[in-house]
Amino acid sequence: MEFQTRDRHTIRAVDTTSLTIPSGQFISVLGPSGCGKSTLLRMIAGLTAPTSGSVEIGGEAVAGPSRKVGIAFQTPSLLEWYTVTENIALPARMGRRRVDKRDVERRVEELLTIVNLTALGGKYPSELSGGMRQRVAIARSLITDPAVILMDEPFGALDAITREHMHDELLAIWRQSGATVLFITHDIAEAVYLSDRIVVMSPRPGRIVADVANELPRPRGTATRSLPEFTRLTSELRVHINH
Ligand SMILES: Nc1ncnc2c1ncn2[C@@H]1O[C@H](COP(=O)(O)OP(=O)(O)OP(=O)(O)O)[C@@H](O)[C@H]1O
Ligand SMILES: [Mg+2]
């Protein structure tokens, strides 16, 4: 993926990359700032067309955004004139398929509970903290029960306790839905706690320099973080990142 800058230079954001993700896998992407992680996610989401190469989901070429793909962006882009509930429901109300209003409302309530924002459905984004806004965006990414969930550092603005709560909620959603999750993070321990597999990208132009399987037992929980394998994997990834 190459971008043209304003002064007519070409920036190669993502170098030749080949990645096959089995259906239902939880994969994390680690890499330094500016290495092309968000660009990779936007290409998978159909928001940015690669300058060469292609993206396929379930054997079909990605040509644009789809309801089957839920996205939580790096900066939660909420509509300020919509309430929390309306923001979360938005992706379910778009597109041609008719959806039952009550089904959407019920699902919004469930998601509000999951992200610990019960009773805040009527608030407007300007009344929320940064972490709350981020959790609204996470709930919104899940409203269509997507088969593919793309998350770009979704827990960056959360405090440690809320973050750990969200890890377990995300794993529960993933287990129940059978969705494929691609999760971008700077946090090695977070990647190890969550994933089946972790890929490490090089500095720009990003390419995949390591592809590491994570066989830590599931379900994961507090005890996972004190397993020797947890520490070993974390150190292994740190070596790849610093290379
Ligand atoms: N629309 C664009 N036009 C020009 N350059 C872009 C555009 N989008 C991204 N880039 C450049 O591509 C490179 C990769 O950006 P990207 O946002 O994918 O990085 P990232 O790995 O997500 O970084 P971070 O961890 O800081 O979020 C950067 O050098 C960035 O400046
Ligand atoms: Mg990014």
Image (cartoon, rainbow, N blue to C red):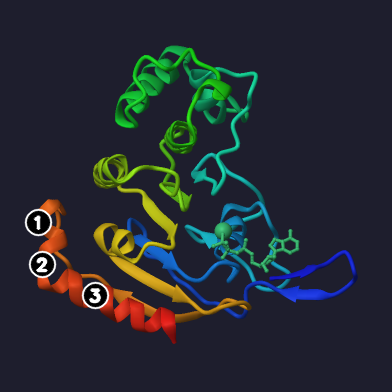
197 relative to 242, above or below: above
Secondary element at image label 3: helix
Secondary element at image label 1: helix
Q: Quadrant of the C terminus?
A: bottom left
Residue placed at 39% from the left, 82% from the top?
240
Secondary element at image label 2: loop
225 relative to 172, above or below: below
Is 225 left, or right, of 72 in this rendering? left
- Which residue corresponds to mark 3? 233
Within 10 Å of disc 2 (Cα), the crowding (few <14, some 14-19, many 20+) is few
Q: Is residue 60 visible?
A: no
Quadrant of the image occupied by residue 40: bottom right
Within 10 Å of disc 1 (Cα), the crowding (few <14, some 14-19, many 20+) is few
Residue placed at 63% from the left, 24% from the top?
80
Residues at discs 2 and 1 in contact (Cβ within 8 Å): yes
- Which residue corresponds to mark 1? 223
Q: Position of residue 75 (x, y in %)?
A: 57, 44
Distance Cα–Cα, label 2 vs label 1: 7 Å
At label 1, which amino acid type do we have? Answer: Ala
Is 209 left, or right, of 46 in this rendering? left
- Which residue corresponds to mark 2? 227
Residue placed at 33% from the left, 77% from the top?
237
Task: Choose between 39 and 177: the one closer to the eye.
Answer: 39
At label 2, which amino acid type do we have? Answer: Leu
Q: Quadrant of the N terminus?
A: bottom right
Q: Earlier in the sequence, mark 1 or mark 3?
A: 1
